[in-house]
Every structure is written in structure tokens, then in C-alpha cells.
Image (cartoon, rainbow, N blue to C red):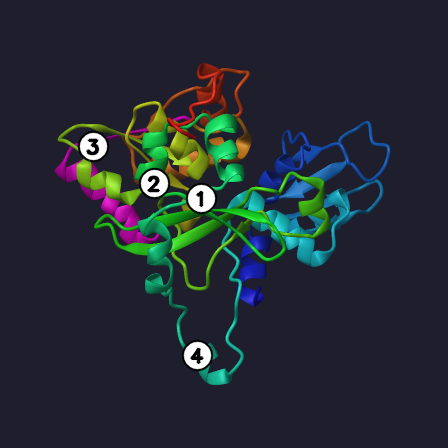
Amino acid sequence: MDHFEITRLRQLPIEGVAQRIELHVSRHKSLCPFHDDHHASLSFNTRSNTYRCFACDAHGGTIDLVMRHLGKSFPDACRWLADSHNVILTEWKPTTQAAQSQPPTFDATRYEPFFERPWLSQEARRFLFDERRLSPAVVRWCRLTSWTDRLQTHWLQIPYYDANGKLIGMQNRNLDFNKEDGNLRNVPRFRFPYGARCSIYNLPVTAMLQQGEPLYITEGCSDCWAMLSAGHKAIAIPSATLLSRADTKLLTDLATERQTTFHMYPDRDAPGERLFMQLKAALPSLEHHQLPPTCKDFADYYMSQHPTPSRPEGA
């Protein structure tokens, strides 16, 4: 990771990071996890994006908070922040000065063959059909495929296409991330090829929208797969801050030209509601839908409504 990526992680909202590590933030304060605190002495400054405890003097920014609270090294804390906020960290950097002056590019021709004939390992099938209970038709539509690296880590490959069906990026999801051996090897949860553009997911569905048809916006691919499996047309974004002007214009043009109505089930946490409000600023017609109190996100809600696996025939 480079200086700009580290800066980006430091600019993540400090209170949102605190809530991701399960601190209860109220009125810019929370109980300090670094000493026996009973009076909410940990204070958050949203202007400087920092925290400070006025009792034990613990202080710092987003990366410092994760390092200290979760007991991680600096690189591991950066990877944790990137994984939990869907921030893309490049896997490879050019070594020569001439190469560094070139803008990052994604070699789509290298990866396109992977998605022409998708193949799902047993680990991928277990994740998609047994755990997530997704529709096999949705898995085929999204062209999800899988592979196993030389360290025997199992990965799900997720392609990103533009509205015309051109491959513009790819995301690798670690299917072993929650297993003890994966954590011991310090393998990240997500990996992105150098130069991949992964802002809006499932853009090809926008070309299929009828006049006035609703489009659901989800946070992350998993929610999008669940929404598609539930029978709705949907796209996903990792964060409103990652939306380019071109992406925003694409969505606003849908509202203007096709009278598309936008809907969202925000995650049941402060970051989810913050994402909704950021999108609402760009899409005033965006409609808020409330999840049940027992569900943290739409994928969780979808699984609660589909308790049995959805394995395709012959799987």
C-alpha cells in the first residue's frame, strides 16, 4: 500500500470506525476500552478525525484505534480497515520511476477467460448455496467463479462490469477468512488486481431497467446477491465516497430518463445510515426501507426468509 492509500484509511470517519470495532458512540463519546471506564471518557473529534481519552490519555486516529483496540500491527490494522470498509488496496506496485509515473491500468484480457466458463469449488458452493442460500440463476448471472492459490487458500472471484458488459475490475474474496488457519497465515479478506475499478457492482442490470422500474442499492456484493435472489433488480456500492462523477451521473440519468425509483435497506448501524444519507444527497428520490431489529443487513434478512440451502441440481 502507498501513502495515498494510508491517507485514505486515516480519513475514514473515526466514529464509524469506532462502531465497527463495537464501541457504543453517543454524542461523540464512548466508554474507553483502554482502562476501566465508567463515565464515557473517550471523546471523538470529527473535525480532526481523532480520538482522545481524558482519563488515560489514549489518543490517535483511525489506524491507531484499530491497532490498540484489536492488538494489530500497523499493516494488519490497515488491512482490517480496508476489508471492513471495502477500500481497495493495490496488490502490486511498479518498481521503476518511469512505471510509477503511469496511471494504474487493469488488464481485462488477462482475467476475462476466468469468467467465460465459471467454475465453483466445493468451498465456493458451500458459501454461495449453503451459507448464503443464493439463487443458482443469480450466481450464473454474476459469473462468479473460484480458484485455490498455492497456499491452499480458497478464493471467490467476483467480476465488475460496466453498463455495457465490459470487464472493468475484479474482486477476490477469501473463503477461508474466518477459519483459524487463514487468520494465522495473515491472508486478507479481499484482494483486488492492480488498477481494478470496483465502485458500482452489477451495472449491466441498469441496461435491463424498464420505464419507472425500481432499482435497489445495496452495500457490498453479498447484499446485492441476496437482493437479486429475492427477485429485485439491484446494484451495490462499497461506499458513497467511492462514487465517481461518472457513476453518479449514470444513476441520476436513470432517474431522469427512465424515471427509475431508487430503494435501499441500509445496514442496521451508523455507517449504514450514513451511507444512505450520502446517497440521498445525490439521489433525492432514494427511499429508505427498515430492516427487522434481528437483522444486521439485507443478506441477513434474506437468509432468515430462506432457511434451506439452494443448491443447483446435480451439485
Q: As shown in the figure, which amino acid type bears the numbered disc 4?
A: Ser
Q: Where is residue 269 in the image (x, y as percent from the top left)?
A: 54, 29
Quarter assignment of residue 19: top right
Residue 243 is at least partly visible in this image: no
* Residues at circles 3 and 2 in contact by the CB criterion of under 8 Å: no
Disc 1 marks which amino acid?
Ser
What span is in magenta? 243-265
Between 40 and 12, the one lying in front of the other is 12
Residue 101 is labelled as 4
Q: In this view, does 250 lie above or below 75?
A: above
Q: Which residue is drawn at 52% across and 71% down?
A: 93
Residue 311 occupies quadrant: top left
Residue pictured at 20% horizontal, 32% vertical: 260
Disc 4 on helix, strand or loop?
loop
Question: Which structural element holds mark 3?
Answer: loop
Mark 1 → mark 3, Cα distance in angstroms: 21 Å
Q: Position of residue 7 (x, y in %)?
A: 57, 60
- Mark 2 sits on what residue? 142
Quadrant showing the N terminus: bottom right
